[in-house]
Image (cartoon, rainbow, N blue to C red):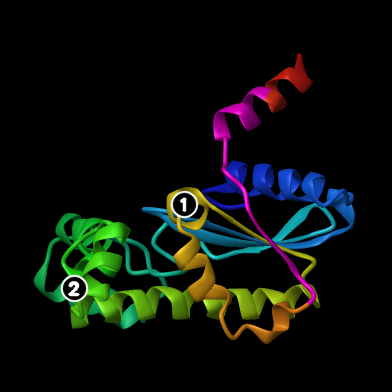
Amino acid sequence: MGFHGISHEFVAKEAAQKIKKPFKKLKIITCHLGGGSSITAIKNGRAVDTSMGFTPMEGVVMMTRPGDIDAGIVLELAKSFSPKRANEILNFESGLKSISGTKEMLEILRKAKKGNQEAKLALEIFIYKIKKYIGAYFAVLGGCDLLVFTGAIGWGSLKIRKMICKDLAILKNTKILAVETDEELAIAKKLQKKL
């Protein structure tokens, strides 16, 4: 299930329990949104796609990572920077931070509310990219029974959840839940089963 795999599995199972439906019979899209963010499509208890790739840089735009970018950008960086420096730029200086000047979502929301154009743009890009993945995964799954938000931003910000779900008509028959992740508990449960 990708770099946030334990989180995605945990919240998907928790959400299925909350709606009293069997996890292995549901089509679920989970959105782990925090400093790093990833989205996973789950069908019948198995992840069929996740937004992160070989590294956690792929996928939705994140606080300091670019998300999906044209590979040509990497080639351009290679012309001017060492591989180490290019990696630092892509992992720690890109994403919403490079647009808004901060890597804190609360600060971006505050600045956007005050009319800061860079913060507004960062927020618009973040919401747009997440909606794009939700729509794609809805198509991949052939529908969606549950949309689950987790992570510091996904679980912690009702405002962000509302912005993401606004105008997503495809979700009219989808249950939408915010579930706090607990990766340590999920790992402990897995270990307990093995003992």
Residue type, mark 1 in image: Gly
For label 1, the residue is 156
Q: Is residue 17 left or right of residue 126?
A: right
Magenta segment: 173-188
Give the mark toward the camera: 1 or 2. 1
Residue plotted at (30% across, 75% down): 122
Alpha carbon separation for disc pair 1 and 2: 35 Å
Residue plotted at (44% across, 56% down): 153
Q: Quadrant of residue 175?
A: bottom right
Residue plotted at (59% across, 86% down): 167
Which label sits on residue 89?
none
Q: Position of residue 137 (x, y in %)?
A: 67, 74
Q: Quadrant of residue 65?
A: bottom left
Residue plotted at (27% across, 56% down): 104
Above/below status of 22 relative to 123: above
Above/below status of 9 relative to 136: above
Q: Position of residue 40 (x, y in %)?
A: 63, 61
